[in-house]
Image (cartoon, rainbow, N blue to C red):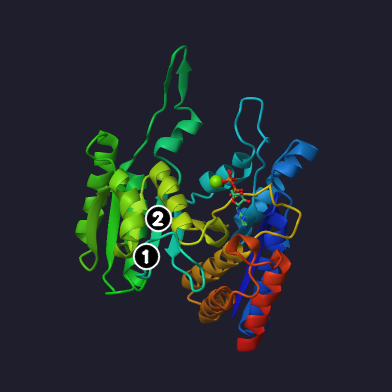
């Protein structure tokens, strides 16, 4: 019997509103499955807490996250919450967890959803996953590689063989177990880089190729990042699993989310070998916070990803079923289009859309 402890960090802005929906959905899904039990402990962390107390996340909360089976995060950070040296406060929570728990891969599924208009010309179904290297690359500069001297600023990109191998292997693992492209089921990993210009990216590609050589059942291809952005708009149905360095992965996954319905639908996971943290790809959206307007779908779909990850780690069919049910219930609410939030052209509140997802779950229980 699968019994899991979840550390929830609702966080800032719309974070608490969407987390409330996600926890209600999780509760309902677990209640319907006797073989699944989930206990959630919520912790106060984020920019609001930092403003109030001077600390964004206590060591106790960090330890609770480390000890939990998974971490579920709403949204952390507010626009003006910065330390005197300019660093954003959300790093105290997100980067601390990402680095200390070695959440080296950012997983961002990209799919066209029923009832949701896309920004794309074609009508072929889109279903790919971006795997972003999460702890090195150009953003590693943040931890000391940035230099501003008079009129010159430089940043250092860090690509290690070990880090690249880990994220490439994760991408191939994913390609091996998912269904492949919707139209022909081909399994393929696309390596996105800029190997023609920077030797660091050429190195990333060469390590990727070493891993690809070991994975015979999956095709490989290379695409330069600039071409990639065009392909994501012109022929997104071509992709299956896409792997990229930290900054490139950040950019192409935001673009990907925009092409298939926007940030309110974009789920994401930060995972390593031992730990997993699940949160929507969007931020705390302070412009709509506190008004029950946020789209909870990205958060709910991230919760489904969490259950799916737990299911694989623990070989647990009940958790897999809960994940599939939550995903399906959310897609049905989107397809019906009656109880959807304003960002999707509807007039439902965040909590009402949550009610609709819970009702769909109840119907299929
Ligand atoms: P961060 O720096 O934390 O990533 P951001 O600057 O990218 O934040 P978001 O908070 O993600 O900004 O919001 C960007 C825009 O998308 C805002 O206008 C916001 O209202 C909208 N948005 C984000 N998430 C949602 C959501 N779940 N539902 C509806 N609108 C959203
Ligand atoms: Mg953002």
Q: Residue at x 31, y 45 (%)?
A: 225
Mark 2, ligand 2, within 8 Å: the answer is: no
Residue 14 in view, yes or no: yes
Q: Residue at x 56, y 67 (%)?
A: 301
Dot 1 falls on a residue whose secondary structure is helix
Lateral position of residue 9 relative to residue 95, left or right: right
Query: To which quarter of the image does residue 277 belong?
Result: bottom right
Q: Residue at x 19, y 57 (%)?
A: 213
- Identify the disc placed on residue 256: none
| Residue situated in front as seen by the camera: 270 or 329 | 329
| Residue situated in front as seen by the camera: 116 or 363 | 116
Q: Which residue has dot 1 on it?
A: 174
| Residue situated in front as seen by the camera: 184 or 118 | 118
Q: Residue at x 70, y 50 (%)?
A: 13
**Which mark is first along the chain, 2 or 1?**
2
Q: Which residue has dot 2 on it?
A: 131
Across and down, in percent, residue 291 comes to 76, 56
């Amino acid at each position: 019997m699968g019994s899991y402890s979840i550390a929830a960090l609702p966080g800032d802005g719309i974070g608490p509103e969407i987390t409330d929906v996600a926890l209600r959905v999780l509760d309902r899904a677990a209640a319907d499955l006797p073989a699944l039990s989930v206990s959630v402990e919520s912790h106060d962390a984020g920019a609001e807490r930092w403003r109030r107390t001077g600390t964004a996340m206590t060591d106790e909360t960090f330890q609770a996250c480390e000890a939990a089976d998974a971490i579920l995060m709403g949204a952390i950070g507010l626009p003006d919450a910065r330390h005197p040296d300019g660093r954003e406060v959300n790093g105290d929570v997100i980067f601390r967890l990402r680095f200390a728990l070695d959440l080296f891969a950012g997983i961002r599924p990209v799919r066209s959803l029923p009832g949701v208009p896309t920004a794309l010309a074609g009508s072929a179904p889109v279903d790919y996953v971006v795997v972003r290297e999460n702890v090195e690359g150009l953003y590693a500069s943040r931890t000391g590689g940035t230099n501003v001297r008079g009129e010159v600023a430089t940043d250092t990109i860090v690509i290690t063989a070990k880090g690249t191998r880990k994220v490439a292997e994760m991408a191939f693992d994913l390609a091996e177990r998912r269904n492949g492209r919707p139209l022909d089921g081909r399994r393929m990993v696309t390596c996105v880089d800029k190997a023609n210009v920077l030797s660091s990216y050429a190195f990333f590609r060469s390590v990727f190729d070493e891993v690809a050589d070991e994975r015979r059942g999956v095709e490989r291809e290379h695409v330069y990042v600039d071409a990639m952005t065009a392909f994501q708009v012109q022929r997104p149905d071509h992709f299956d699993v896409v792997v990229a360095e930290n900054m490139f992965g950040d950019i192409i996954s935001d673009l990907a989310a925009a092409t298939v319905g926007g940030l309110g639908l974009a789920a994401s996971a930060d995972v390593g070998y031992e730990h997993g943290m699940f949160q929507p790809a969007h931020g705390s959206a302070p412009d709509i916070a506190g008004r029950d307007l946020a789209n909870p779908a990205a958060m709910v779909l991230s919760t489904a990803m969490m259950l799916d990850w737990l299911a694989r780690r623990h070989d647990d069919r009940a958790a897999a079923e809960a994940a599939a049910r939550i995903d399906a219930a959310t897609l049905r609410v989107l397809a019906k289009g009656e109880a959807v939030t304003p960002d999707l052209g509807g007039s439902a509140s965040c909590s009402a859309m949550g009610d609709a997802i819970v009702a769909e779950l109840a119907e299929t229980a």
